[in-house]
Image (spheres, rainbow, N blue to C red):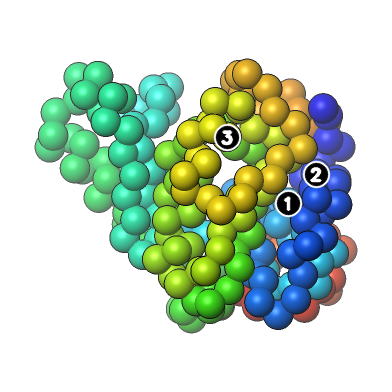
Amino acid sequence: MLFLDRRDAGRRLTGRLMAFRGPDVVVVGLAGGGVAVAAEIAARLRVLLDVMVVHELRPAQSRPAFGAIAEHGVRVVDPDRLRALPTGTAELTRIERRERDTLRRRSERFRGGRPHCGLAGHTVVLVDECLADAARARAACRAAYAYGAIRVVYATPVACTPTVTALAGDADKIVCLHTCDHLDDIAEHYQDFTPIDDDHIHDLLRHPDSPTTSAPRRAG
């Protein structure tokens, strides 16, 4: 399945999320391309939009992630990948500390120092541009529950089939338009896969009258 861009992916994904409308629902995009997909969904469902910052933990950019961290102090680690690493404990601690500091700064910037928009007692629809690795998705789900969500739905346009299976115990429901056995190059599923930087994310969250989305929202 090929999407024109993230906005098209969000528009098409909304068709599978029409049951999630109302004041008890918050759409939360994972920082990065997930916010662009989520913004379109929130606009069409006319519900609040927020952001969740999740960082993968990896010893080098070319190596697989051995885990992920998210807001609210959430940490998810793949024990098999961790044991296979030649990296020492001190270096792994340094990597996690660096990512935690960056995560905190990004979260504060997106919200302007304000707290999360209030997930407690709500159904939270977590949205990302793809679902390739379980650690990132698990961290997001657990952070949403840590904030008090009563139900977590994980929605994504495209996903790796084994990862969907692995996430089943962390999300109450997983909504996906297309699955495949391997998801090595996400860009293959998008005609336009222009990188989304933090300035773009900030703009999506702060400007409800932007051409990308126009529904009422609250980012913090």
In the rendered image of this protein, does residue 178 appear above or below residue 103?
A: above
User: What distance separates the C-alpha of mark 1 from that of mark 3?
Assistant: 19 Å
Q: Is residue 217 visible?
A: no
Identity, as a three-letter code, of the amino acid under mark 3: Val
**What residue lies at 64% left-to-right and 59% top-to-bottom?**
125
Residue 9 disc label: 2
Along the line of sight, which residue is nearer the eye, 152 or 195?
152
In percent of width and height, residue 103 lies at: 40, 56
In the rendered image of this protein, does residue 84 appear above or below residue 42?
A: above
In front: mark 3 or mark 2? 3
Q: Which residue is mark 3?
A: 164
In front: mark 1 or mark 3? 3
User: What distance separates the C-alpha of mark 3 from that of mark 2?
Assistant: 18 Å
In percent of width and height, residue 212 lies at: 83, 60
Identity, as a three-letter code, of the amino acid under mark 2: Ala
Identity, as a three-letter code, of the amino acid under mark 1: Val
- Total numbered labels: 3
The answer to whether marks 1 and 2 mark residues whose Cβ atoms lie closer than 8 Å is yes
In percent of width and height, residue 11 lies at: 85, 51
Q: Which residue is mark 1?
A: 37
